[in-house]
Image (tube, coloured by chain):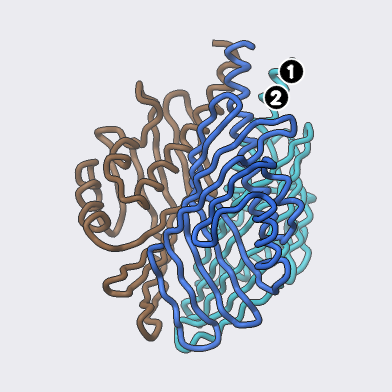
Chain colours: A cyan, B brown, C blue
Amino acid sequence: MSDLEQRLQTLEAESAIRKLKAQYLNACDAKDPEAIRACFMEDAVIDYPPLGEFNLDGLIQIFTEMAVNTNIVDTHQAHNAEISIDDDTATAKWNFSYSMYDPDSKNYRLLTAFYHDKYQKTDNGWLISYTRSEPRSVVDGSLDGDVKGNWIKA
Amino acid sequence: MSDLEQRLQTLEAESAIRKLKAQYLNACDAKDPEAIRACFMEDAVIDYPPLGEFNLDGLIQIFTEMAVNTNIVDTHQAHNAEISIDDDTATAKWNFSYSMYDPDSKNYRLLTAFYHDKYQKTDNGWLISYTRSEPRSVVDGSLDGDVKGNWIKA
Amino acid sequence: MSDLEQRLQTLEAESAIRKLKAQYLNACDAKDPEAIRACFMEDAVIDYPPLGEFNLDGLIQIFTEMAVNTNIVDTHQAHNAEISIDDDTATAKWNFSYSMYDPDSKNYRLLTAFYHDKYQKTDNGWLISYTRSEPRSVVDGSLDGDVKGNWIKA
């Protein structure tokens, strides 16, 4: 492979990883478990404290319980990508913001975190092989009355 | 065109579309109708429920009424881009967040939505040919007293 | 240099500048002064009204006072990048959002701004040579009682 093609391939990898992360986060918002599943390696490790560490089936299960089977409306948005490509693997750090509202309880949650991710190039394109969230702040409140929020460094 | 050049052109298209969307959103914040106009095809279709469906003149008109001629301060930010290039056309899904404050009424609005866009490559570069927003959550409140917010799945 | 290589280099510059800005903002969140320093030219000009205009040592000093030596938790996220490359220099406009919470006073701040940046390609890669923030909205409040927020066009 020529030097130019190698450089092109690195940029294509970055583009694919940006899109992959977007697909995962937008699928979470859309409550689409199959689209979430399609973003990960089968043996991916998903470490989302304080919820726990999951394999892919475990992630789909807790996501189904917490989002698909409830009336919550939530938003997952990632920013400030620091992506590093190394041939067929890659890493990224993202700055993440999240909002959730539960119309049944009228409670809301606002959260920020870093994501620390690893990616693998496969025959099905780039996939997430490892992801860990590092919670940074949490605000819990209610639209129903007094602000009962707290903002903790997680 | 060589295979390498074709791949390069696809990456350039993605770069141009990211910048185009940024120019549009930043022009909205800056209350600059001419900069907004420059982002669209002349026959673009703009579907922003519940506001309505607009042609380009209609968009400029309602934007002038709601933003240029008022004292509101608002912020348009798009995230999680899923961009697909197909030669001279492209599509994208974005995860959008919006905040608005009206210093006259002291009311604010926080909104999230998906954007579903189509783009066209023209002699003037890439332009938006179609855009539709899919509202996901709305919080309305006032800084003047009790929180009178509500958070609806739109 | 061939035309193809020139075009590739422009895309690589954009990629590097996106990562540079991300590194700077994530280093602010992580309260890491040395990582902040590494993002700037030694003679960089940093204009952050109403805080003031700083050289690099001045920025590190005020950052240490306001963030490193306090218990605040804050989040710096940039969006809507309008990046323009011109050989070994570049400019960008960003749409910025910021949140801060002080667990000692229970006060919080939400802020939006434009960033107007200049970058320089050096032997150490792309660095920030100039950055100016243009504040757009500020909300100050407290989680401790009544909302005492205000939202001003800065």
Q: Secondary structure at mark 2?
A: helix
Q: Which numbered marker is on residue B17? A: none
Relative to residue B97, is residue B8 drawn left or right? right
Relative to residue A24, is residue B128 drawn left or right? left
Give the labeled residue for mark 2: A7
Instruction: List x then y, in percent, for residue B60.
Output: 23, 46
Q: Quadrant of residue C7?
A: top right
Query: Quick check: C68 above or below B4?
Result: below
Q: CA distance from mark 1 to mark 2?
A: 6 Å
Residue at position x 58%, y 69% in the image: C100
Q: Quadrant of the C terminus of chain B?
A: bottom left
Residue at position x 37%, y 85% in the image: B145
Q: Quadrant of residue C98?
A: bottom right
Classify mark 1: residues with Cα within 10 Å, few (<14), some (14-19) or many (20+).
few
Q: Chain of mark 1?
A: A
Amino acid type at circle 2 is Arg
Residue at position x 58%, y 24% in the image: C87
Residue at position x 59%, y 52% in the image: A79
Q: Pointers 1 and 2 in contact (CB under 8 A)?
A: yes
Instruction: List x then y, in percent, for residue B96.
Output: 46, 54
Instruction: List x then y, in percent, for residue B62.
Output: 22, 53
Q: Which numbered marker is on residue A3? A: 1
